Image (tube, rainbow, N blue to C red):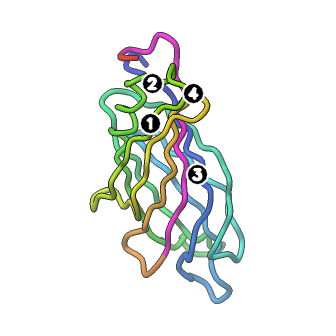
């Protein structure tokens, strides 16, 4: 990939108050897409407040594309049920990486306001922690009666990548 900028680790932490799709709750899993890349978490049985703590790694290239997230309820004999979706624009996150403030002992955080189009439930500051760019994100799921996802974004630089 000649336009590769770096790697984005998306840590899927947990779901909160996800929708019931079965009599006993739901069996949720998360699908993350960026461009042609598609990754998914494990299924958490009978749980509308699942804890995944799973790392999914995406390669980030120019042009920078948003991350789309979909939550599904795993079913055995029928197609999986939709449990909501969300989208997050990572442009501001990548711009923070490009600033390369890693030489500062306590680099400031860059506030990231909640915006309608990318489903942020609250302000989501982008910060430098231990020499790495990190963003804790809470996403309000769309197209569903309830549910939020908690994620953490963490950048991994690739030496010699263009623009860095």
Residue labelled with disc 4: 131
Residue at the image position 57 percent from the left and 71 percent from the top:
16
Which one is nearer the viewer's eye here, 54 or 122?
A: 122
Tag 2 or tag 3, which sits nearer the N-term? 3
Tag 2 or tag 1, which sits nearer the N-term? 2
Q: CA gap, disc 3 to disc 4?
A: 28 Å
Furthest-right residue in view?
A: 45
Residue labelled with disc 3: 40
The image position of residue 56, as x and y in percent, is: 59, 43
Label 2 packing within 10 angstroms: few (<14), some (14-19), many (20+): some
The reply to whether dot 1 and dot 2 touch (C-beta < 8 Å) is yes
| Dominant secondary structure, magenta | strand
Q: Nearer the viewer, mark 3 or mark 2?
A: 2
Tag 1 or tag 4, which sits nearer the N-term? 1
Residue labelled with disc 2: 101
Q: Is residue 91 above or below residue 21?
A: above
The reply to whether dot 3 and dot 4 touch (C-beta < 8 Å) is no
The image position of residue 115, as x and y in percent, is: 29, 58
**Image quarter of residue 114:** bottom left
């Amino acid at each position: 990939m000649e336009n590769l900028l770096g790697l984005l680790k998306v840590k899927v932490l947990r779901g909160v108050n996800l929708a019931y799709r079965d009599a006993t709750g739901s069996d949720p899993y998360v699908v993350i897409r960026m461009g042609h890349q598609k990754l998914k978490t494990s299924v958490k049985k009978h749980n509308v407040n699942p804890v995944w703590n799973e790392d999914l790694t995406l390669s980030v290239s120019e042009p920078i594309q948003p991350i789309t997230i979909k939550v599904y309820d795993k079913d055995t004999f029928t197609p999986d049920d939709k449990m909501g979706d969300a989208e997050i624009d990572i442009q501001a996150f990548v711009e923070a990486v490009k600033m390369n403030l890693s030489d500062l002992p306590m680099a400031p955080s860059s506030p990231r306001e909640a915006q309608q189009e990318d489903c942020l439930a609250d302000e989501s500051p982008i910060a430098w922690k231990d020499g790495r760019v990190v963003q804790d994100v809470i996403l309000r799921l769309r197209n569903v009666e309830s549910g939020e996802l908690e994620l953490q974004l963490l950048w991994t630089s690739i030496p010699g990548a263009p623009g860095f």
